[in-house]
Image: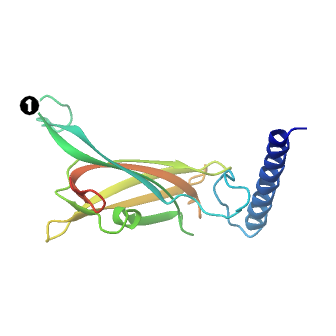
């Protein structure tokens, strides 16, 4: 057996053992009523239980606004403008009552400034559970007197019968237009 084959075999065995350890910890926590989201062990020599908190992407895009003359159906004039779009992906867990609230800035690196927030704010939440769970999600744009802003994100988890589903893990993705100052790159 060559050195490369031995290394590959050793790495595969180590990876399998790390995943087995992680699954054992997951089963132990489940016995106490705590479910953690599925994950894969990427670095077998370091088995740790943590999920990504957030991933952000800042890019330019176009935002189109259209009046709704009757209040329901589009038909008014459209206005399109270029805007910075902040795309943030994260994971979180609902509380014992099946709900959670958090601010967008809780998931951004230190120093981000968000001002002149626009609409629409898009939010999608996806359960990370082994049992059936439904999620509802909503947002509120917060405009501060100093011109900066934030977005409050609310997520509720439900069991199939309609009762709240406590401690439900989920991933979320939010897209918001606005003026954003990234501390690593300066004003955008």
Residue 93 locus on image (x, y percent): 54, 62
Residue 134 x, y percent position in the rendering: 54, 49
Frontmost residue, 182 versus 39: 182
Front position in the image: 75 or 24 = 24
Could you tell me which secondary element the residue under label 1 belongs to? loop
In this picture, residue 55 sits left or right of residue 25 = left
Extreme residue toward the right, this view: 1
The residue depicted at 13 percent of the width and 28 percent of the height is: 75
Q: Which residue is mark 1?
A: 77
Colour convention: rainbow
Q: Is residue 173 left or right of residue 22?
A: left
Q: Report x, y in % for residue 141.
A: 25, 59
Q: Quadrant of residue 109?
A: bottom left
Q: Based on the displayed image, in which of its 4 quarters is residue 70 positioned?
A: top left
Of residues 172 and 159, the one drawn nearer to the viewer in this rendering:
172
Residue at 14% in and 66% down: 147
Of all residues, the one furthest to the front in this rendering is 3
Nearest the camera: 5 or 41? 5
Identify the residue at the far left of this view: 77
Residue 148 location (% of width, % of height):
19, 65
Residue depicted at 84% across the width and 43% down the height: 9
Residue lying at 54% horizontally and 68% vertically, measured from the top left: 95
View extreme (top): residue: 75
**72 horizontally vs 41: left or right:** left
Picture quarter with the N terminus: top right
Instruction: Say which quarter of the image contains residue 74.
Output: top left
Q: Residues within 10 Å of mark 1 (few under 14, many from 20)?
A: few
Vertical placement of residue 60 versus 176, above or below: above
Count the numbered circles shown: 1
């Amino acid at each position: 057996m060559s050195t490369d084959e031995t290394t590959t075999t050793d790495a595969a065995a180590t990876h399998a053992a790390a995943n087995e350890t992680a699954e054992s910890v997951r089963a132990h926590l489940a016995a106490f009523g705590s479910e953690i989201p599925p994950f894969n062990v990427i670095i077998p020599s370091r088995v740790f239980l943590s999920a990504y908190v957030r991933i952000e992407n800042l890019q330019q895009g176009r935002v189109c606004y259209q009046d709704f003359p009757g209040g329901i159906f589009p038909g008014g004039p459209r206005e399109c403008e270029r805007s910075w779009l902040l795309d943030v992906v994260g994971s979180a867990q609902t509380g014992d009552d099946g709900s959670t609230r958090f601010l967008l800035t809780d998931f951004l690196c230190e120093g981000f400034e968000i001002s002149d927030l626009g609409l629409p704010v898009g939010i999608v939440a996806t359960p990370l559970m082994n049992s059936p769970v439904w999620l509802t999600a909503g947002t509120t744009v917060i405009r501060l007197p100093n011109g900066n802003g934030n977005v409050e994100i609310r997520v509720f988890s439900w069991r199939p019968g309609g009762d709240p589903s406590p401690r439900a893990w989920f991933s979320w993705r939010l897209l918001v237009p606005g003026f954003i100052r990234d501390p690593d790159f300066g004003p955008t």
